[in-house]
Image (cartoon, rainbow, N blue to C red):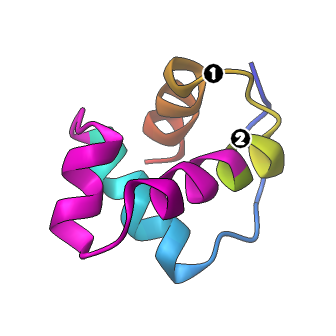
Amino acid sequence: MAEAFPVAITPAEQRVLDLLRRGDSNRHIAAQLVLSPRTVESHVSHLLAKTGCHSRTQLLLWALAQG
């Protein structure tokens, strides 16, 4: 898993990450944020790259560890 370290996350990525923490699907996140599902996928991909995580589950665990 990625180490806990400061990561430059955009406000849009943070909103997506907050909804991921709740267990929401990309489609539900898109509806909540009035985005396309593809945009949400893009934010998730950027989050994975920035954190060094390899899956949504790993990203969720990383996010929970960040507080």
On the rendered structure, is 24 left or right of 41? Answer: left
Q: What secondary structure prevails in the magenta region?
A: helix
Kindly indicate the quadrant of the structure image that contains residue 3. Answer: top right
In the rendering, at what x and y percent does residue 51 appear?
76, 44
Q: Nearer the viewer, residue 13 or 63?
A: 13
In the rendering, at what x and y percent does residue 46 appear?
72, 55
On the rendered structure, is 21 left or right of 56? Answer: left
- Circle 1 — which element? loop
Q: Counting residues from the N terminus, which is met first, the one under dot 1 or under dot 2?
A: 2
Q: Nearer the viewer, residue 11 or 4?
A: 11
Read off the magenta span: 22-45
Report the quarter where the N terminus lies: top right
Which residue appears at 67% of the width and 51% of the height?
Answer: 47
Q: Is residue 26 located in the magenta-colored stretch of the structure?
A: yes
Please, which residue is most extreme toward the bottom here?
11
Question: In the displayed structure, would residue 40 be above or below residue 45?
Answer: below
Q: Nearer the viewer, residue 60 or 46?
A: 46
In the rendering, at what x and y percent does residue 20 appear?
35, 43
Which amino acid, mark 2? Leu
Q: Tell me the distance, in whole angstroms, between the alpha carbons under discs 1 and 2.
A: 7 Å
Residue identified by numbered label 2: 48
Give the numbered dot on residue 55. 1
Q: Residues within 10 Å of mark 1 (few under 14, many from 20)?
A: few
